Image: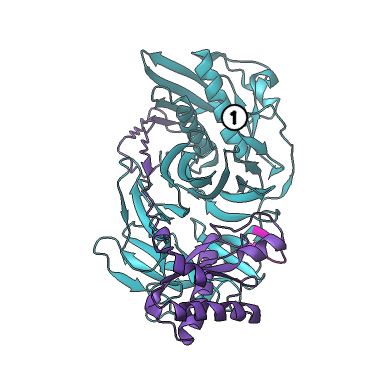
Chain colours: A purple, B cyan
Amino acid sequence: MFIFRNKLNFLIVIIFLSSCSSMNVTQEKVSSGGVKTVEATSINNENIRYDSMAVFANATIYFEFDKSNLTSKSIQTLKSTVNALNENSSIQITLAGHADERGTREYNLALGQRRAETVSDYLVLNGISKSRITVKSYGEERPAVSGQNEKSYSKNRRVEVN
Amino acid sequence: MKKIFLILIFSNFLLSELVLEITQGTEDPYRVALVPFKGDKEISDTLNKVIQNNLVRSGEFKIFESEKLLSLPNNEEEIVFNDFKILNIDYLVMGEILTEGTNISAEYQVFDIKKGSKVRTSTVYGIPNKNRQLGHYISDGIYEEITGIKGIASTKILYVTQKEDFNLVIADADGANEQILLKSTEPIISPVWSPDSKKVAYVSFETGMAKVFIQDIASGKREIAIENSSQISSPSFSPDGKFLSLTMYQDGNAEIYILNLKNKNLTRLTNHYSIDTESSWSPRGSKILFTSGRSGSPQLYELELRRFNSRPKRLTFDGNYNAKGAYLPNNEGIVFVHRANTNFQIAIKYFDENFIRPLTEAQMDESPSISPNGNVIVYSITDEGMGLLSGVTLSGAKFRLPAKKGAVREPSWSGFLR
């Protein structure tokens, strides 16, 4: 019996020689498999808008597991953010959503985004122009604190207003 | 379904760099005598270790080394088949290393003990200083000859490491021979291979926001998959390599789209106010599997691409979290992250069964990726707060890949490279 294969790699040469009807005879060559290392250039555009005035609007809003709705405590915090934004009409803000490490990374990225959008919706409902807000998510990639316990997790499920 | 039972626990006699924790395997493994390769002693030692490790890791083999054998033939003529029959050995493997200057090659033969005859004779031409690769090719030839299934020792695994900075890394399937594809100070997530294993796609935060990049492995040439003002994530190549499914956030919510890589046209697949993400393609490219929060918790759904106005069909009902799914290469089921109570496990659901089979039992198992032959699943675990890679075979064998510096996560298995 012969084994037939799909060979995509041109480096591999397989020759079947039928010297014996029940024996497989093969020849092949190890592929070189070259890898080039690249270094990413990070564009750290966050620091650019950290002027002294934006600090007044800084806040962190916390969430329950797998939830993106605002708690009454969060709303209190956001009221001060709305005031700060109204007093300083030139401030642009970034809402960065985060999740705790439980669950899958992509789902957490989407969850962080939902949390940031929830905060954005609240600010817009309270008169802040959407053009002043940038929304994004870091999912579980940038935890505020490390540790595998609810205390750490609760600090990581957040939206940072900057 | 083969019955599984406890065979043995390897402690420290195998390669120190790979931790094999074979707690379960098939009840009836192939019993293979591995006669040390003749020729250069150092290369022979490497080949023997690599081959033995690869075969044992599959969970389907029991290897008899030279000290356990009754006779050690130097060539085909010297084989006393009865010496192997007595030990109930199924196959005998022997070979020779040939060196000529810097050129290296290996010839090996596989003998069927019951038949008393040679069933395979093969030559593999190696590359200088890549003797492990040579061993992987030989392992795959032996595996294929005996099981009738293509081996995965010569395939690669792609993953992310983080110490302070983030690295996207390619290594051999046994975790050796690490090579860095991308270094970044910002997070890298969700790496995947193109179907021809010549490119990778991943999410990088280097622009300050999640964006999908496609990078050529050999040349390092990379590009953003599609320009968009909002974040983009979760790439997955179609089996023909012409399309990339991804998650876009332009409506403020995670929705799945298909990008035509040639003309950059986008087709929207989902439209729901809840999260839709983690898309992956069925083996023939006719269905998309994805995670959706539309039922109130993350669950897996599939969408038929070739039917008019098709609606997502829910596939998972047990457990409060079922996410990051992938189809088995034979399309007989799906593998995914499953949480029944509080622990995240890797689980499998066959389409002809109405229940979920957990494959692992730790607390925080994530990111399953299936080997191209469908027999092994590599995934990430958290051990004392540290990310490591583990593997489980569908025959029940478990192993752990060597620990790296820093956290290791999100493994993705290449296609066949041999």
Q: Nearer the viewer, residue B160 or B185?
A: B185
Q: Amino acid at mark 1?
A: Gln
Find residue B180 and report its image quarter.
top left
Q: Nearer the viewer, residue B363 or B282?
A: B363
Q: Residues within 10 Å of mark 1 (few under 14, many from 20)?
A: many
Q: Residue at x 63, y 61 (%)?
A: A102
Q: Chain of mark 1?
A: B
Q: Is residue B173 above or below residue A160?
A: above
Image quarter hosting the N terminus of chain B:
bottom right
Magenta stretch containing residue A118, yes or no?
no
Q: Is residue B289 visible?
A: no
Magenta region: B338-345
Q: Residue at x 66, y 58 (%)?
A: B345
Image quarter hosting the C terminus of chain B:
top left
Q: At numbered mark 1, what does the secondary structure look like: helix, strand or loop?
A: helix
Q: Is residue B163 above or below residue B273?
A: above
